[in-house]
Image: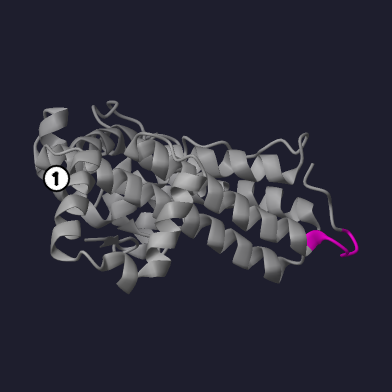
Amino acid sequence: MSIIAGQGDAARSLALLWGEAETGGERTAPGPKPALSVAAVVAAAVEVADEGGVTALSMRAVADRLGRSSMALYTYVPGKAELVDLMYDRAHGELPGAYSLEDGWRAAATAWAADLRALYLRHPWLLQVSYARPVLGPCEQRVMEALAGVLFATGLPAYTLRAAAASLFDLVRGGARTRAEARLAAAATGVADTEWWAERAARLGEVAPDFAERFPLSVRLSAGEAEGGAPASWEERMDATHAAGLALLLDGLEAATEGRPGGVSPR
């Protein structure tokens, strides 16, 4: 189940994202230095989510990790809704703010996609936060700015690149979600994906011996994986599928640049 971002108080959330959170949330007023900070609270919350997902996230769980009371946290973060926004944005701060175009826009786009996918797999709880409504934080925006810098190097108009950017995000996020859920399924059930598929395929052959005749095109698609020399492990197969899908998307973007004034070679 997804959590919708941006549900907290707009004024407080944006102030935290663009002000206190960027500076660590340290108070600058005279007096004793506070024992906590926004940054410390967010870092602890990220650790909780990394271990148990957003379902394990609560102000109490974060407070316990910090060795404080829940009430102590409200001095820094108004509530869980604002905390999720801060966590989501802070995690995206691990990504580069720009990519070199020395090897062409296509290589840069591939690197951007690889970094974003790795971030999602490193913090799979990010995939539980819907991006239907963006957090609108500085780190999240830097990720988009980095991609825009790559895409505008193609010379294509903004309306075309807007669709390309959305497609790239969807491709990376969707593939990462499948891979993350496969890991979760294996851990939760104790049954590896290869073992699960092998048993189900055998059973399916028993209960539907005419499967190939009824669904010939589906079988043909599956055979295409073998023709391409599919990797042995399930995760490697998903990685290969992601790479192939990304290549197809970039092929289409490259084709759109051909013959257009200002179009730039990907290499």
Q: Residue at x 36, y 64 (%)?
A: 10
**Based on the displayed image, in which of its 4 quarters is residue 159 positioned?**
bottom right
The percent coordinates of residue 238 (x first, y second) are 40, 44
- The C terminus lies in quadrant: top right
Circle 1: element type: helix
In the image, residue 67 above or below residue 110: above
Q: Identify the amino acid type marked 1.
A: Ala
Q: Residue at x 23, y 42 (%)?
A: 193
Q: Residue at x 75, y 39 (%)?
A: 101
Q: Report the side of 203 relative to 234 (left or right).
A: left
Q: Report the side of 244 relative to 149 (left or right).
A: left
In the image, residue 49 above or below residue 147: above
Q: Report the side of 194 relative to 137 (left or right).
A: left
Q: Please tell me whether residue 254 belongs to the stretch shown in magenta.
A: no
The percent coordinates of residue 172 (x first, y second) are 47, 51
Q: Residue at x 39, y 68 (%)?
A: 216
Q: Which residues are magenta?
A: 257-262
- Which is nearer the eye, 212 or 181? 212
Q: What residue does disc 1 label?
A: 56
- Which is nearer the eye, 64 or 121? 121
Q: Please tell me whether residue 259 belongs to the stretch shown in magenta.
A: yes
The percent coordinates of residue 128 (x first, y second) are 28, 54
